[in-house]
Amino acid sequence: MNEIIEIPNRGGNITSVTAPALPEERKGLTKKEVAADHPTWCPGCGDFSVLALYFKLIEKRKMWHEKITTVAGIGCSSRFPYFVQAHGAHYIHGRALPFASGISLSRPDLHVFVFGGDGDAFSIGGNHFNHTARKNIKMTYVVMDNWVYGLTKKQTSPTSPLGFKSKTDQWGAVDYPINPMKQAIAAGATFVARTTHTNPNHVLQMMEAAMDHDGFSFIECLSECVEFYEGAFDASNPRKGGVFNEVPKDHNVTDELAAYKMAGEDFPGRFGIFYKVSKPTKNAKEADINKTAMEKVKGLKDWQILQKNFDRMK
Ligand SMILES: Cc1ncc(C[n+]2csc(CCOP(=O)(O)OP(=O)(O)O)c2C)c(N)n1
Ligand code: SF4
Ligand SMILES: [Mg+2]
């Protein structure tokens, strides 16, 4: 069946576009069909695993090229959209979320995925993170947290632990790190989850749940930088003698305080969905406003709406 896509224009009218006819049974895209350039990450970098699971998600959820939107800022992790053969943008450092917000608000038929690093998200992009979360704009934001600035070769990041020796803290980091999970909950994100690149099934599970959430979904995904912070997450990896503890089955995901408390547990902490609530999105609220505005100009052509506005200003 042909899909009708409705795109509101600035005059408040809706342009309906009929998508090309599709074969009844369209198979999910395989990795081969959606993988672009060879990723330029260092061998063994955790980011490879996140990308592989995004490809799996695309295939499993039958997202086709025209529906895939991958956005990122700047950093090793933010190279992500280069490696996906579909629509996307490698945008300005820390500014991926406002760019993604525009896409999300204007294209309700898409689900936007944003990938990036801890520096991009919480340092230069810290304010955008807080505001996109509080606005509850529908999208999934995966922060590939490696506790360091990888691309610029080892500076302290907002998530680096105290004492971490880097090019900016030669005697060890002295600033208290932020806690991404607490930050997301406090900012108003309506879906907050945590996973790690060493557990592929879990990463996929979290991405699927985030994609199905109607609102701003945030995932902190531990992703090891083998070049500048090797072994950072060993304590969370059973293959390295660590423990992978899931969120307890009886945890109430709508309990904000319980989620906040769990986020404060010492590393390696818990993995899974900490917090999930249903709240109207900015997307839905704006769609309502547009609908009401459009009722008022029903049947008018764009130039007539403009004329009306000019007349009002006389
Ligand atoms: C406006 C601006 N400031 C600084 C930089 C330099 N810069 C590039 S990436 C980066 C930080 C990358 O760290 P992170 O976001 O954690 O990504 P990673 O490389 O660790 O995946 C910085 C400071 C830049 N590109 N643009
Ligand atoms: S520098 Fe670190 S984060 Fe960047 S590609 Fe290499 S291992 Fe990955
Ligand atoms: Mg980083």
Image (cartoon, rainbow, N blue to C red):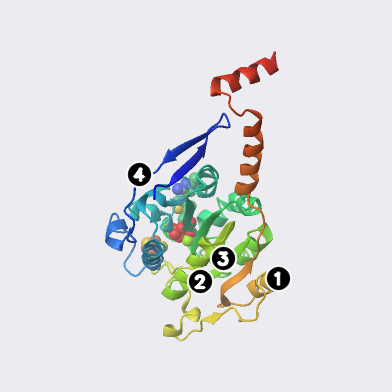
Mark with earlier residue (1, 4): 4
The three-letter code of the residue at mark 4 reads Pro
The three-letter code of the residue at mark 3 reads Ala
Residue under numbered circle 3: 173
Viewed as shown, does residue 121 lie left or right of 189? left
Element under label 2? strand
Foreground disc of the pair 1, 2 = 1
- Report, in whole angstroms, how far the alpha carbon at label 1 lies from the one at label 3: 33 Å
Mark with earlier residue (1, 2): 2
- Report, in whole angstroms, how far the alpha carbon at label 4 lies from the one at label 2: 38 Å
Residue 98's place in the image compared with 237, above or below, is above
Element under label 1? loop
Residue 255's disc number? 1
Mark with earlier residue (4, 2): 4
Can residue 293 be seen at all in this image of the molecule? yes
Element under label 4? loop
Residue 181's disc number? none
- Report, in whole angstroms, how far the alpha carbon at label 3 lies from the one at label 4: 55 Å
Can residue 155 be seen at all in this image of the molecule? no
Give neighbour class at mark 2: few <14, some 14-19, many 20+ (Cα, 10 Å).
many
Q: Are the residues flagged by discs 1 and 4 in contact, CB closer than 8 Å?
A: no
Foreground disc of the pair 3, 4 = 4
Mark with earlier residue (3, 4): 4
- Report, in whole angstroms, how far the alpha carbon at label 1 lies from the one at label 4: 45 Å
